[in-house]
Amino acid sequence: MPSVLSVPLPDNPYTVVNAPGALTELGQQLLSLGLGQKILVVSNPEIFAHYGRLVINSLTQAGFSVTSHLIPAGENHKTLDSITDLYDTAFKHRLERSSTLLALGGGVIGDMTGFAAATWLRGINFVQVPTSLLAMVDASIGGKTGVNHPHGKNLIGAFYQPRLVFIDPFVLKTLPEREFRAGMAEVIKYGIIWDRELFEQLEAAPRLDSLEGLSPELLETIITRSCQAKVAVVSQDEKEAGLRAILNYGHTVGHGIESLTGYSSINHGEAVALGMVVAGRLAVNLGLWSAAEAERQDAVIRKAGLPTILPSQLTVEALWDSLQMDKKVKSGQVRFILPTAIGQVEMTQAVTQAILAEALADIP
């Protein structure tokens, strides 16, 4: 049976539906939302080859008029040029304000489709059908949309909530292992910032580095508890005025690493993992938590097959300069999310370039 999690935002409430093996029922799910007839499915060629026809058939059988638009896979295509191409397709098919953009893919597709939906005709319907673990547990929920700028990740974007998030975990069977591990970085993040019990379950698991290594029960726990954590946070702080900033744990340095490596050699989850390692070391050096807790975190990161050793070409100066463009900079000061216990973090502006350099030097 599908499980349904409500996102009780005052102006834009919606539900997150977790329906294992039920992707064929997507069209029926959308009928209850009162959408217009036209739906434009946005995906990348790899995902579309696996699931595009199934999704389109489900939508057409429910009475929708469906077209598609494909964007090449990869963070390097998360640009305004790709958005312009998507706008051209929306114009060609005469999408109206009652029409819907449906994201079928991972976090990159979801972010771009949401941004296009927020800005086409000043806002049309948007539906998330995440196909990666990272998107299921994190990127599809909360309404952050956007594209990258050459000087930084997601510097161009908008808060725009979907009408529905529809998760079918069965699609993870076609997800490459490296992308599965990238999603585990966000799951570990939730354990550190919010859910100690989730972290302890990850600690106790024999393997975390592949879908096959997880029991069905642990996979269900990972998806459910991560979604619950994300919903709990964004329901209290939709547009990152305060609490929601804790979701950026590992992302401050992580985004800098992604930018400095050209969004090519290190994917988002790997960068977040490295960002968590750095944040853990910063917390130890600032006396916020113990070296033993930092090692517990790093051990789980390694168990998930994620990196804990920084790229050799990374310099303190280049990373610090990159952090100055982070969206979380306030009054010229970088705000870091640092752990104080497993399941608890705080925000600080106490990190200087010298403190960052010391933490980087302490990481093997």
Image (cartoon, rainbow, N blue to C red):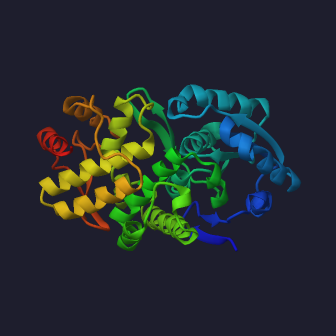
Quarter occupied by residue 201:
bottom left
Q: Residue 310 versus residue 102: which sits nearer the camera?
A: 310
- Which residue sits at x=23%, y=59%? 294
Q: Quadrant of the N terminus?
A: bottom right
Q: Residue 199 versus residue 8: which sits nearer the camera?
A: 199
Percent position of residue 264, x then y: 45, 30
Residue 270 visible within the image: yes
Quarter occupied by residue 338:
bottom left
Tell me if residue 40 comes above or below residue 249 in the rendering. above
Q: Quadrant of the C terminus?
A: top left
Tell me if residue 229 comes above or below residue 337 in the rendering. below
Percent position of residue 212, x then y: 56, 59
Residue 66 is left or right of residue 290, and the answer is right
Residue 241 is left or right of residue 183, and the answer is left
Residue 191 is left or right of residue 223, and the answer is left
Tell me if residue 23 comes above or below residue 205 in the rendering. above
Percent position of residue 123, x then y: 63, 44
- Which residue sits at x=20%, y=33%? 316
Percent position of residue 256, x then y: 33, 37
Quarter occupied by residue 120:
top right
Residue 34 visible within the image: no
Q: Residue 36 versus residue 30: which sits nearer the camera?
A: 30
- Which residue sits at x=86%, y=50%? 60
Tell me if residue 219 comes above or below residue 175 in the rendering. below
- Which residue sits at x=40%, y=62%? 190
Residue 233 is left or right of residue 62, and the answer is left
